[in-house]
Image (cartoon, helix red, strand yellow):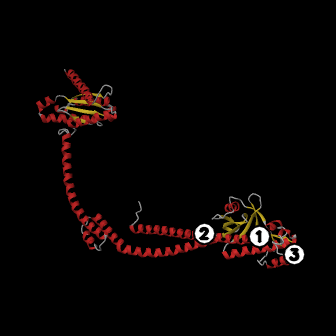
Amino acid sequence: MIRRHGLVEKLIIFFFILLVSVLALTGFSAYFSQLSVYREQSEKKLQNTVTFLSELMKADGRDFLAYQELSIALKDEINIPADFDGNYHEAKIAFYNAFNRKYPGKTPGEEVPYKAMPQKLQILYVTYRQEYWMHIFESTSENFGVFYTYYLVPTGEEEHVYYIIDPVPETKTVDGKDFIVLDQDIYEATEEHEHLWQALKTGKFTPGYDVFDNEYGHTYACYYPLVIEDVTVGVVGAEIEIENVSNTIFKNAVRQTIIMAILMVLFGGVLSFVIGSKYIKRLLELKDDVVYFTETRDETVVDRVNSRIKGNDEIHDLAVQISIMISSIRIYMNSLIETNRLLTEAQDKIRTVNELANKDALTGIRNKTSYDEEVKKIEHQIANEGFDKFGIAMVDLNYLKVINDNYGHEKGNISIRKICMIVCKNFAHSPVFRIGGDEFVIVLENEDYDNASFLVEKFRSTLEEIARDDFLEPWEKVSAAIGWTMFDPENDKGVQSVFKRADNLMYEDKKAMKAARE
């Protein structure tokens, strides 16, 4: 049995689907909207960071270029403690004290080129400048709220760069102490660092960022080229880690969704109560009244429906129409019952007339009219279905006129009924028709078609036994001639040709019986 959902249940399902859909759309919308805003803010923050650092480095001009060149050349000689805390002042004082002792009253870089200084002074200078820029990069990261800032210089080898300024460097151990490894040579694939290499090759900033999943998390990186005296000497990079922020945004979106779900459930509950009490209840009452009328046909239910007609809405209109409909149905049903009774009586009369029209009044078997209808049916089967398994047998009662003249027509009728009974009993699987006063036609079919020869002989034997029975009255000693034949598809065009052949054979049998008596 198919389970049917009620209106209340359907409304609950609809509200649940609506609730889930709205909450899902709200949650996704809130999450992606906040995430989009955060990404835009992050990209702007990264751009501001790298722009700020590059401008500071560009302002340093040739001094920065000298520092960069010496840093790469002396990287293995520079020892900055691994626990460097950003205090570069000691290294600065150490460099200037040593420089002033060596070149009293001179200015480093201008009067004494950095490359002309002794290596020890160069080491002190690079140490001071390295610590200074590490401090600047670390402070900028904190002030701008980015995760990681660094400065890269191409090594000259394809897809390789030096990390000149790297706040998160590797360390090395020298004489039992840990120091920062400077200017690491790192392979950075172009397909993974598209914006990095584009900035180095073009010397121009391109908005957007590269996305990484590494040991630091899920990060976005932005790059700005450092151009000094129209030469791109390196690129400033800044990264921001967004996974934690994405999780926070997701939690906020979930929180908003839950709050909205609670509000919608409360609203839905109130709405369901109002709809249930004001509308659904009235509809269910109307449904019960209609079901009651359907089962009982009790038209007093109209009074109950009328008593519930209230309000000024569609349910009120529906109740009015149901009341009118029940009254109309009752009137229609009474009319229909009377019409059905009259129709049944008419059909019975027509059936009786049809039976009388197709039945022989004396014998009760089918008459000539019925035989003609049978012929039409067989002709149709021959033409449309290729029907060919049938035959015709003709039986003609002998001496009917003699019995009528000598004993009366009543005794003749007894003879007709008796020969009819014998024919019907002998050919039990075929229709038998009385087509004249003493003539009968059998349409041989089914088992009688297959055993026609045997049944004809049996028929003749039955009549011979009757003829030898001296206890029978003359009108009971019935005698008849029989002729029979089968439909031949190659020679017969229809039933009529078979009928004529059977009729001729019957008359031949009658002549033979007469000759035998004489």
* SS for callout 2: helix
In this view of the protein, which residue sits in the foreground, 91 or 334? 91
Marks 3 and 2: CB-CB under 8 Å?
no
Residue 185: numbered disc: none
The quadrant of the image that shows the C terminus is top left
Determine if residue 367 is in view. Answer: no
Residue linked to disc 3: 103
Q: Residue at x 26, y 73 (%)?
A: 307
Instruction: Quadrant for residue 69, please give it.
Output: bottom right
Residue 39: numbered disc: 2
In front of the other: label 2 or label 1? 1
Residue linked to disc 1: 64
* SS for callout 3: loop
Compared with residue 213, is residue 357 higher up or lower down, i.e. above or below?
above
10 Å crowding of disc 2: few (<14), some (14-19), many (20+): some
Instruction: Quadrant for residue 150, please give it.
Output: bottom right
Query: Which mark is first along the chain, 2 or 3?
Result: 2
Position of 35 compared to 10: left or right?
A: right
User: In whole angstroms, how far apart are the C-alphas of marks 2 and 1?
Assistant: 33 Å
Query: Which mark is first along the chain, 1 or 2?
Result: 2
Q: What amino acid is at disc 1?
A: Phe
Q: What amino acid is at disc 2?
A: Arg
> Where in the figure is residue 357, as x and y percent of width and height?
18, 41
User: In whole angstroms, how far apart are the C-alphas of marks 3 and 2?
Assistant: 52 Å
10 Å crowding of disc 1: few (<14), some (14-19), many (20+): some
